[in-house]
Image (tube, grey):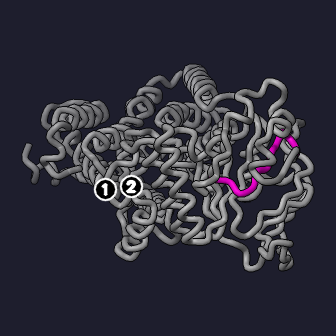
Amino acid sequence: MIAVSPLPHTELEDGRGALVKLDAVGVRYGSQWALRGIDLTIREGDRLALIGPNGAGKSTLLKSLLGMVPLTEGSVHLSQPPPTIGYVPQRLHFDASFPISVEEFMAVAAPGSSGWFGGVPASKKPMIMASLEQVDAAILARKKLGALSGGELQRVLIAAALLQNPRLLILDEPASSIDRRGAASLQTLLLSLHRECGLTLVFVSHDLHWVSHLASRVACLNGTLCGLGSPEEMLSEHHLEETYGDSFYPKAGSFGLDRRAV
Amino acid sequence: MSLSDVWSYEFMRYAILSAMILGPLCALLGVFVTLRGMAFFSDALAHSAIAGVALGFLMEEKFGLQMDPMLVVLAFSLLLAGAMAWLSRNGTLAPDTVIAFSFTGCVAFGVIVISMLGNYRLLDGILFGSIYANGPQDLLRQGTLALVAGGFLISQMRSYTLMTLSPELAHAQRVKSAILHYLFALLVAATVVVCLKMLGALLLSALIVIPAAAAKLLSGNFRTLLVTSMIVGLFAPLLGVWTSIQLDLPSGPAIVMCNVLVLLCCYMIRPFASRLALS
């Protein structure tokens, strides 16, 4: 049963409102459950990381938040008025020789009609440039989308998501295709967007070091929700072994939960 | 033969008008066909039309059902395109596998039926077509298709571009991807059927694929790609018709060879494209 319904205003213990609430959410592909029994509340201002091994249901959970997969059971409740959700996919699936410039892509990603014959309408130009400037990528506006590096592409995808003016930004493995320096720079960008625009962030990542620096809460998934709490708690050896199994490596101590940057 | 001589013949006027209507339409469609990796799909649909034509003649010969052959081919191709699009999206087989067995099966069925009816001249017409066989009724069909298909593509350009770049992003933005996917397949099928008379089943996909491929070599952005593709789509078939008249060549192959020539020229001038301000 799919149920996406309004969430009555709920003030949580820390005074923040609930943005999205998942009640006993389950998603099944064929006879295989990808996720089951997920009870999770995303709070205003959260930086929620979803971690877990491959096939744990992290991307399925993101897709269920976006309404991209039908729920087999349970329900998703949105606060009122429903928060605008921006989505940053892991990558674009396109032929890199597709001649589309960054600003043309932004025009396509922006709400409303696109320009005549794929061009950038004058009415959209200011918002496109403002969005690109927000992620420090204005210089890329005329560049071909297929010629961008992994880090540049992530910035452009975030800028495109910002065009929706979102309250909640969902990112699917944003740091997966970029080097360490790019990942650090992306982390700084996301933290500044969180601080300056009040964005709530939900993201999937396999890089636990990155998670430890960015997340305010961590949800451990392994088909079910096997832990939810602060990064200090969830990135402990006990929780990681529970999430990833005995073969987990590296051990939790190697993340060095240095959260001074947060 | 001078231009005024050419224009004085009715069948040549129809041929030129037909090239001017269908060339840019196929080129516009071709941009999305190539970007969405559907070149094989359009080629397969063109070949499969042989089965539609054979089916029309079988119904007429064996069951005495008098129907416009074009309508039979159109109905067959739309059904086939819908089935291939559904199987590719929901089946367990890879899309190119689905397309390969559908099209070879259709061609085999069509050739068997045509050989049983003993009408080999018909096969020749289906395979190679002739733009000079167009009449006013054909031009009306082509004009209607150009208005409907062109208008639809232009109105849905944002959705199709987003679907091409990232199906997930399109879904997140509430683009009705599934419906648009099927509509695109049907649009390709309708265009292929209407163009069949112009180039025939063997050569038709050149009209769809080559202008977009040539334009892609010169374009630095999407708008340039669309405009250049349509310009190539307009002038290459006209050049083909002209060459066919002047050198007394069959029209279909002449049109395709002119398209290939333009593609080669684009390839050669590619390094200078930025200096020509095309990028």
Q: Are the residues flagged by discs 1 and 2 from a single subunit?
A: yes
Task: Report which quarter residue A6 is drawn in.
Answer: bottom right
Q: Amino acid at mark 1?
A: Arg
Q: Which span is picked out in magenta?
A: A214-224
The image position of residue A258, as x and y in percent, is 64, 47
Tell me which chain the residue with mark 1 is part of: A
Residue B5 in percent (x, y) is at 11, 50
Check the image and report above or below for B132 versus B201. Answer: below
Q: Is residue B110 visible?
A: no
Residue A213 magenta-drawn?
no
Chain at tag 2: A
Pinpoint residue B22: horizontal percent, then vertical percent: 36, 51
Give yes or no for contact between labels 1 and 2 (Cβ–Cβ under 8 Å).
yes
Residue A146 lies in quadrant: top left
Could you tell which of marks 1 and 2 lies nearer the N-terminus?
2
How far from the left and from the top, in percent, is residue B167?
59, 49
What residue is disc 1 on?
Answer: A142
The amino acid type found where label 2 is placed reads Val
Q: Of residues A185 and B178, which is closer to you in this image?
A: A185
- Residue at 39 percent across and 48 percent down: it is A145
Residue ID at (90%, 36%): A31
User: Total of numbered circles in the picture?
Assistant: 2
Q: Which residue is at a point 31% across and 34% down the rendered structure image?
A: B252
For residue B43, side relative to residue A166 (left or right) = left
SS category of the residue bearing label 2:
helix
User: Within 10 Å of the Cα at label 1, are there few (<14), some (14-19), or many (20+) other Cα atoms?
Assistant: some
Residue A102, numbered circle: 2
Identity of the residue drawn at 40% across and 36% down: B204
Residue A256 in view, yes or no: yes
